[in-house]
Image (cartoon, rainbow, N blue to C red):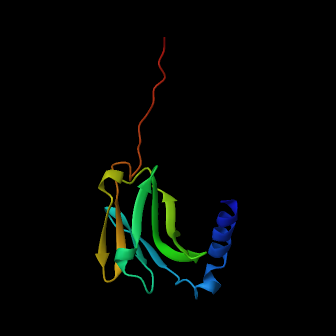
Amino acid sequence: MIKSFKKLLTSVDVLNTINGGISEPFLSLQEQDSAREITVRVPGLTSESLQTEIVNNTLTIFYMIPININGQLMLVPQIIYNKTIPYFINTAKIDFLQRDHELVVRLPFNELRDGSTHRMELDHD
């Protein structure tokens, strides 16, 4: 088991040379009035190959790379984006779409976008 794991790590480290290289992903972050948008494109991949996941308030965008280890095909995730979702994003309304062979992840703002201001008074007993 440990031997296979070491081989997997080694194959991931040298993936660039053994498998002919990995395409450099294009990632763009844009802010609009009501949301942030993350646009992702990886040359040679369709936008359907890109996967989006939210786990423990962390947004991850990735695709799977097939690697042959000892005659066994394994899928290894290639992470493009992995960040904690800010407090001012409405996580319940995050969505994604395909636009011109790109994946677009839309992160709509919530009411905390412009900050919160209130005055606190000290209670006197």
Answer with left or right where residue 1 lies relative to residue 72: right
Question: What is the quadrant of residue 20 in the picture?
Answer: bottom right
- Quarter of the image with the N terminus is bottom right
Question: Which of the 4 quarters of the picture holds residue 52?
Answer: bottom left
Residue at the spot 30% in from the left edge and 55% down from the top edge: 93
Q: Nearer the viewer, residue 63 or 100?
A: 63
10 relative to 19, above or below:
above
As drawn, 21 above or below 91: below
Against 13, residue 121 (above or below) is above
Q: Where residue 60 sits in the image (x, y, percent)?
A: 46, 62
Residue at far front of view: 71
How far from the left and from the top, in percent, is residue 90?
34, 52
Left or right? Give the position of 93 relative to 2: left
Q: Residue at x 66, y 68 (%)?
A: 9
Residue 51 percent coordinates (x, y): 40, 68
Q: Residue at x 45, y 26 (%)?
A: 121
Q: Of 122 and 26, which appears nearest the observer?
A: 26
Q: How many marks?
A: 0
In-image side of 108 versus 5 (left or right): left
- Residue lying furthest bottom in this view? 20
Horizontal and vertical percent for residue 67?
55, 76
